[in-house]
Image (tube, coloured by chain):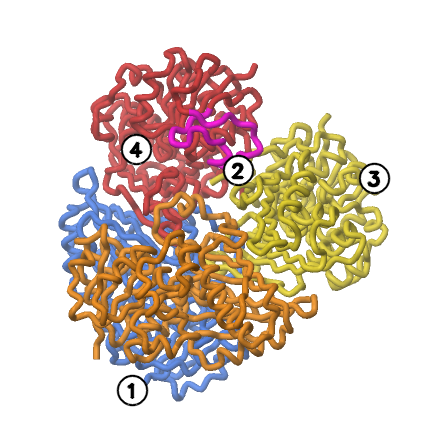
Chain colours: A yellow, B red, C blue, D orange
Amino acid sequence: MTHKIAILGASGYTGAELVRLIATHPSMQIVALSGDRKAGQQMHEVFPHLRHLGLPVLQKIEEIDFSGVDLAFCALPHATSQAVIATLPRDLKIVDLSADFRLRDPEAYAKWYGKPHAQLELQAEAVYGLTEFYRAEIAGARLVAGTGCNAATGQFALVPLIKAGVIDLDDIIIDLKAGVSGAGRALKEGLLHAEVSEGYRAYSAGGTHRHLGEFDQEFSRVAGREVKVQFTPHLIPANRGILATVYVKGDAGKVHQTLADAYADEPFVVTLPMGELPSTHHVRGSNFVHIGVTADRISGRAIVIATLDNLTKGSSGQALQNANLMLGEDETAGLMLAPMFP
Amino acid sequence: MTHKIAILGASGYTGAELVRLIATHPSMQIVALSGDRKAGQQMHEVFPHLRHLGLPVLQKIEEIDFSGVDLAFCALPHATSQAVIATLPRDLKIVDLSADFRLRDPEAYAKWYGKPHAQLELQAEAVYGLTEFYRAEIAGARLVAGTGCNAATGQFALVPLIKAGVIDLDDIIIDLKAGVSGAGRALKEGLLHAEVSEGYRAYSAGGTHRHLGEFDQEFSRVAGREVKVQFTPHLIPANRGILATVYVKGDAGKVHQTLADAYADEPFVVTLPMGELPSTHHVRGSNFVHIGVTADRISGRAIVIATLDNLTKGSSGQALQNANLMLGEDETAGLMLAPMFP
Amino acid sequence: MTHKIAILGASGYTGAELVRLIATHPSMQIVALSGDRKAGQQMHEVFPHLRHLGLPVLQKIEEIDFSGVDLAFCALPHATSQAVIATLPRDLKIVDLSADFRLRDPEAYAKWYGKPHAQLELQAEAVYGLTEFYRAEIAGARLVAGTGCNAATGQFALVPLIKAGVIDLDDIIIDLKAGVSGAGRALKEGLLHAEVSEGYRAYSAGGTHRHLGEFDQEFSRVAGREVKVQFTPHLIPANRGILATVYVKGDAGKVHQTLADAYADEPFVVTLPMGELPSTHHVRGSNFVHIGVTADRISGRAIVIATLDNLTKGSSGQALQNANLMLGEDETAGLMLAPMFP
Amino acid sequence: MTHKIAILGASGYTGAELVRLIATHPSMQIVALSGDRKAGQQMHEVFPHLRHLGLPVLQKIEEIDFSGVDLAFCALPHATSQAVIATLPRDLKIVDLSADFRLRDPEAYAKWYGKPHAQLELQAEAVYGLTEFYRAEIAGARLVAGTGCNAATGQFALVPLIKAGVIDLDDIIIDLKAGVSGAGRALKEGLLHAEVSEGYRAYSAGGTHRHLGEFDQEFSRVAGREVKVQFTPHLIPANRGILATVYVKGDAGKVHQTLADAYADEPFVVTLPMGELPSTHHVRGSNFVHIGVTADRISGRAIVIATLDNLTKGSSGQALQNANLMLGEDETAGLMLAPMFP
């Protein structure tokens, strides 16, 4: 059976990545693509690398007939997404890649996103989309909220450790490095090649990055108490890839064993042998997560390093993984592409 | 039916790319990998991005039992390849990615590679591996010689034009730009990040690059007379991609139409609409070739620009395409991966 | 004696590069900086790398008191520049980095820039700013028109050859590669890191790039007849640097000797030994030009490759070199910085 | 008065950087260059970007006549350096850029470098070369030990804080990001463009990097007790630049004030306004250090971020700054070059 798929907001990087992945999916067919400002254009005018695929013309969302659509991916900007989803059929399965439905607490949403949530009813229905930790709920969900790409990376490193109680909850530091594509195709001076290439810097330091809302929510949920981490993201001159270097207090051996056990049966999350360090190079273009653990020379301290590709496992690949579950397909369908190196 | 595949020389970039592509091939199974200096290592120690695949341990070639192997890819260095292939079973299908069997004329080989060919009998048997121009011969071949990556790019731009007689054969310039992975994983000062990044330069200018041997052979064959082109390669600070800017004398409209007709039914070669310019970005990681044609302001002159990914269509993808033909499989099997952008 | 300098349009890359160079100039002092949309900001808010210099606050141009200014650099956008210069004191020395005063023929200007020139009187006064070919005129000029960065590169390769009559004037091809900073700090999708990094492409192919107006003007002037070249620029994933690969018909030995003679006494233009190839790496951040010549294997054909840094010798360094002449300073003052490698 | 300078090991990146800086120094003249394997070559054969300077031919060290040399920079590999310096005249002023004389404790040297120090007498004489903290000693020294580039960066962030007692000495984490040129021009697979570009990773994690020897020595000295930090370096796809993100426990306001006070009169070290974040872009190619401080959302925690260019302030610029002091010159001579951006 072939599932009919719509992608709303197909003219951004996550939209294009969805198309790239679905192109080799055995049981999905893209029947509609939207791109507001680019409606009327062929997808290959916007993304010439997708030229060989027979894709639908970009439409405005209101022009799409959703009656034949089984599932829609929403790759729209934050705030736009909730307004659009409110207008879609109530029985349409949706995987949303925006930040709009990630935070269950309306106050947390208002705090991190600067205005009240306008669709609390939809919010109540949404399931947080980190597949490995919400698999059962996602399989039964109608609306799934894709996670922040940084938020996903940090959670892969930490959720099993917090759950198992093997680290100090009051002294966790996530020093994260990310490529530029996570910021999307927006026209911002700081994203120009000349401003990014051959240099790097921290941004949103000191606890001001919005993905902290997700860390706070998920870590506290797992811990059964409030957990607040330190989080400093850095912009690295590369297009894809996130690498989170996480400093924890706990026994490194236990930390490694806990992660290895937690992910032993996961198809996409690999715990490297003790002491081996991951690289963004080794997951690029794929849905895999690599996690390494090292003991520090100071006893009782460990470093956990997790890496993934922000456009695949960090957003579009994660979204497809969730869609597979929601549609009753094999979770890995279309997602076993090997990383591309070099 | 699953074909049993061996990859000799799997520790280089083309070897790794073969593994990446075969990983999603529906009817191939890798049963042996060789890596001389790295024999005994796991493939994921050499290429951690292939960790999720259950690959055989790297062996020495002489340790491999070829009795159960249907086809071997040889991704060995030039000169080594002919020596090794001479020792392999005479009924083993082989796709060779080295330069050893590309030149049919032993004198041309000696001229461009600096020493006599040592396996002239094998050379006589080999078919030149540019699928689109040798499809029938390749389907029936036992030994196929993969082409030079630059040589392939230039030929996609020019072979149909020379065959159709729509351009001046005495005034052809190929100004080619290539990423670094074409030079392999060799430890050369000129390939260090600090020597490549943020700069670019020509090399082997003036008609000294070895791929001219292939241009001379193939263009002269198609023309039925000697054709010598000018060819200047440039090293560009990127890992993948070749872009050949070809200056020809002829009517741009006829040039475009000739190419469009020649490639109308090809699954991987796309002639862009007149005036549209290709980018290496749009074929990266895929087996596609994009070709653009523009008229110059000086009448009677045209610019043809062809681009492909040197590691896929320029070597490993081309090799797999040929192997598909040799094994009676669909030519495109395992090769419809969409390009990766960004 | 210290010359008082104003920089109009200091918030772009060429403005910042002027500041960088003037920072070590022995006899220039920056007394005014303009930045229209950024007026009121400190220069180090716009360019934090200039923080250590005690620079004037950015002003609107109309706020600047030009009475104490000896020379103004105009690094304003095309078209804006002519309007602004028309309002400046008529005895103020000006080096303009825009395209506004490069083309002496008003019809040529209208053709390449799409509208009539609005300041023909100023245009009549302007001297074309390629120092090595207009040294005497520049020394006596009030208004100097900085050249296009691509145009400068091609002229360094070709002007002496055309003047000496050692090449065929009807068969000249300039295949040029350029980094992104030549396009400025403009917010364009095609200049984003994710769109530029790891790929490359031609643009404005077929004789449509505006710098052809300069080539036509200067080459025809030197030849004493109309000369039209072919010119294809390419965008390369690097921030700085232009490399022009020029295909000519003529004796390579004579070509090399002609260039070596022409530049023998030039402080910034280096003719490499015959057969040696230049790299953008070797001129980056400096005012130097490196030129290499190679004979092709086809007799009677030569390849000339010229490289420079678009932000220094291609614009701001050239502008400073001209200003030195106009102010009676040593032409090389402030310009002997060694290239930065790696 | 012009000082006669020799550079031993001039064929590496730090050697070339010394030449670049000295090229504009008002009172230094390079009279000898050594390059063991490249002896007999012109410097511009090894580094074509230095072609315009009239440099001495590369010699073997034993061929150099040191009688006319005032000061030698030793940019030789670790271990080689101590052997060579032992053979040089005992009254020759030397700035050593290797690791050989950084650690005052022979046991610490043996621990971090894997074998006993062979020149303990010279070691006893050497002064640790971080100018800002050893200015007086350096001015009177004969032998100065240039610091590790990572070690310098971490010390700029931390030394004043440890000295002032405003942070918890038992909980300091240095998460450091570095470009590739710090690893030199060595032929290592991990330094190839294809292995570095578009990806990043940690290395020497867990307290195994040799620069920890310097941190331990210097931090403990300043604290008057043993101080051990956590330190994780990362390899970033850029040629130059180090950025250290340092996590401390202490009042952010006091931390910022302490740094601002400590560096108030320093010509090269800039404390940014509270909350402003530095970038490697803004110090590239220069001798400047930029330091930013941010309070974390968790009270009592602060993030200090320090950045410098590893080839200038991290090695060759630092060396020149020290040489200026040793020769009685203005400390900033030849070092006021503005950073190069973009």
Q: Residue at x 81, y 56 (%)?
A: A105
Q: Nearer the viewer, residue D94 or B203?
A: D94
Are labels 4 and 2 assigned to the same chain? yes
Identify the disc placed on residue B49: 2
Pointer 1 residue: C1
Disc 4 crowd rating (10 Å Cα; few below 14, some 14-19, many 20+) is many
Q: Which residues are magenta?
A: B33-59
Pointer 3 residue: A91
Residue D191 rendering spot, x and y as whole percentages:
41, 47
Disc 2 crowd rating (10 Å Cα; few below 14, some 14-19, many 20+) is many
Q: Nearer the viewer, residue A338 or A184?
A: A338
Residue C113 rendering spot, x and y as whole percentages:
42, 61
Q: Amino acid at mark 4?
A: His
Pointer 4 residue: B211
Chain of the residue where label 4 is placed in the rendered structure:
B
Label 4 and label 2: CA atoms lie apart by 31 Å
User: Is A181 situated left or right of B313 in this image?
Assistant: right
Residue C248 rendering spot, x and y as whole percentages:
23, 47
Label 4 and label 3: CA atoms lie apart by 59 Å
User: Is C327 situated left or right of C161 in this image?
Assistant: right
Quadrant for residue C218, please give it: bottom left
